[in-house]
Amino acid sequence: MINPTDLSGKLAIDVQDMNALRQSAKQNSPDALKAAAKQFEALFMNMVMKSMRDATPQDGPFDTEQSKIYTSMLDQQISQNLAKRGVGLADVLVRQLSANGGVQAPAAPLQNTTGAVSDPGKINSPQAANVKAFEDRLGAHAEEASLTTGIPAKFMLGQAALESGWGKHEIPAADGSASHNLFGIKATGGWKGRVVEVPTTEYQNGAVQTKLQKFRVYDSYADAFRDYAKLLRSNPRYENVLANAKDAVGFAQGLQRAGYATDPNYAAKLTRIIQQSLSA
């Protein structure tokens, strides 16, 4: 039997380490799952570091092949240290894998800036029971926000569903608890509350990039809807969103034009969820 702690002191970056990581996860014990999740988090952070490094010019007079090797080694060490401290991804994976009974569970899509879910693929239609549970749990908060914004509650529920994967891929707080951030709102604009920093995927000039971003943490879903409503009411760039919220297409396209999300397919995804998944 492979001891999961054997992998805790190194980053699984070669085939042998990856095989050991896979075998450790197959044990399906809490310790094995935690070790596998931590290694995945370290790998992901290494990808983040590499992406950021690739975006930095490296053709200066002091950039040599030897310096690039040392830089790569430094990035791996930084990634390992970040993973040891934890950015919340490992905790999410452990909860998902434990709930689904094994390593076949898909990784949670990470949230994008103030908007797009980072999974560039299609948004799968949820089961009717899951949709009803989502509406029952959040419907009253959406109705309250609707009174202050004029946006139909169904539209806001659709956006919350898109951003959070119907509540299953909500951004976790730093301690692994719920952040209640259903709308992927970043901790900007003078935000004074709690925050959590997580990797997020964004689209920039048509290219997918991974960055570390800070997001707001709320005490409840009611607070999340109130803050979302306040954001749309107080930010001038969303004036047209409020003015064109009479139908799902206008609402979704207005959000995309206002820059709520960087995903080029955001409006189409949101429109589909509102029209096809949610009740009237």
Image (cartoon, rainbow, N blue to C red):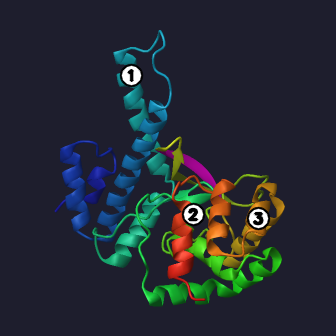
Residue at numbered disc 3: 232
The residue sitting at 22% across, 66% down in the picture is 26
**Magenta region, residue range:** 208-216
Q: Position of residue 230 (x, y in %)?
A: 79, 67
Residue at numbered disc 1: 68
Whichever of labels 2 and 1 marks the residue nearer the N terminus, that label is: 1
Do tag 3 and tag 2 residues touch (Cβ < 8 Å)? no
Can residue 236 be seen in this snapshot?
Answer: yes
Q: Report the amino acid beneath label 1.
A: Lys
- Left or right of residue 235, residue 90 in this image: left
Whichever of labels 3 and 1 marks the residue nearer the N terminus, that label is: 1
Q: Could you give the CA–CA distance between mark 3 and mark 2, rounded to whole angstroms?
A: 17 Å
Please, what secondary structure does the residue beneath circle 1 have?
helix
Magenta highlight on residue 116: no
Q: Relative to 246, is 109 above or below?
A: above
Q: Residue 158 or 230: which is nearer the viewer?
A: 158
Do tag 2 and tag 1 residues touch (Cβ < 8 Å)? no
Q: Report the amino acid beneath label 2.
A: Ala
Q: Badge 1: how crowded within 10 Å, few (<14), some, or many (20+)?
A: few
Disc ID at residue 267: 2
Front tag of 3 and 1: 3
- Left or right of residue 267, residue 189 in this image: right
Please, what secondary structure does the residue beneath circle 3 have?
helix
Can residue 181 be seen in this snapshot?
Answer: no
